[in-house]
Image (spheres, rainbow, N blue to C red):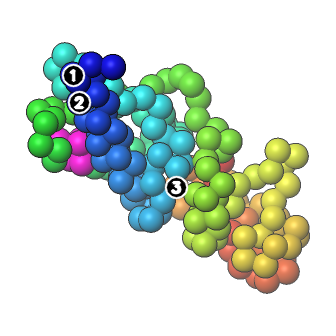
Amino acid sequence: MTAATQTQNTELEAVEAAVASVCDPEYPDVSIRDLGLVESVEFAKQGVLVGLIPTFSGCPALAMIAADVRHAVEALPRVSTCEVVWLTSPVWSTSRITPAAKDQLASYTVVLRAKDGGLRCPVCGSNSVSDQSEAGPTRCRSVAWCESCRNVVEVMR
Ligand SMILES: [Zn+2]
């Protein structure tokens, strides 16, 4: 490995760390990397190019996330500009969320639907969660109701 390559790798790591420092505006302590949004980080001719995967199109949080990523990366001393592109493939799915982030989401009473379609209450662990409404607080989530502890649970789609 040449010295130049090594410098570039260190810079790439710095950029990746900056991208990972960005959190979803709706879950201020969950990194967008842990949510599986970050697909690619690379140096292009014009600056840094970050490829993100939208969790669902039309979510207003996406514009905020893109702006936060640009700010975080452009704050690095060696980066002049950063461009964020929203990729259409691969398609985001809840399987891209890291186990640690799933735990963090549970503290927001946000739950992911299991592969068999079942729901488990993030508050009490009961399986008696029933879908309440297709219209959740955002298009990303729907609202369900735990019959056991009577908490409202948000289901990430
Ligand atoms: Zn419950």
Which comes sooner in the sequence, label 2 or label 3?
Answer: 2
Range drawn in magenta: 69-74
Left/right placement of residue 127 relative to residue 122 reads: right
Q: Position of residue 74 (x, y in %)?
A: 17, 41
Residue type, mark 2 in image: Thr
Task: Residue at 58% x, 57% y: name it.
Answer: 101
Picture quadrant where residue 99 is located: bottom right
Q: Quadrant of the N terminus?
A: top left
CA separation, marks 1 and 3?
A: 46 Å
Contact, CB < 8 Å: mark 1 with mark 2? yes
Look at mark 3 in the image and give the residue it sits on: 138
Task: Residue at 53% x, 22% y: name it.
Answer: 89
Task: Residue at 16% x, 47% y: name it.
Answer: 75
Toward the viewer: 93 or 148? 93
Look at mark 2 in the image and give the residue it sits on: 7
Disc 2: CA contacts within 10 A as few (<14), some (14-19) or many (>=20): few
Q: Position of residue 155 (x, y in %)?
A: 67, 58
Task: Residue at 39% x, 48% y: name it.
Answer: 20
Residue type, mark 1 in image: Ala
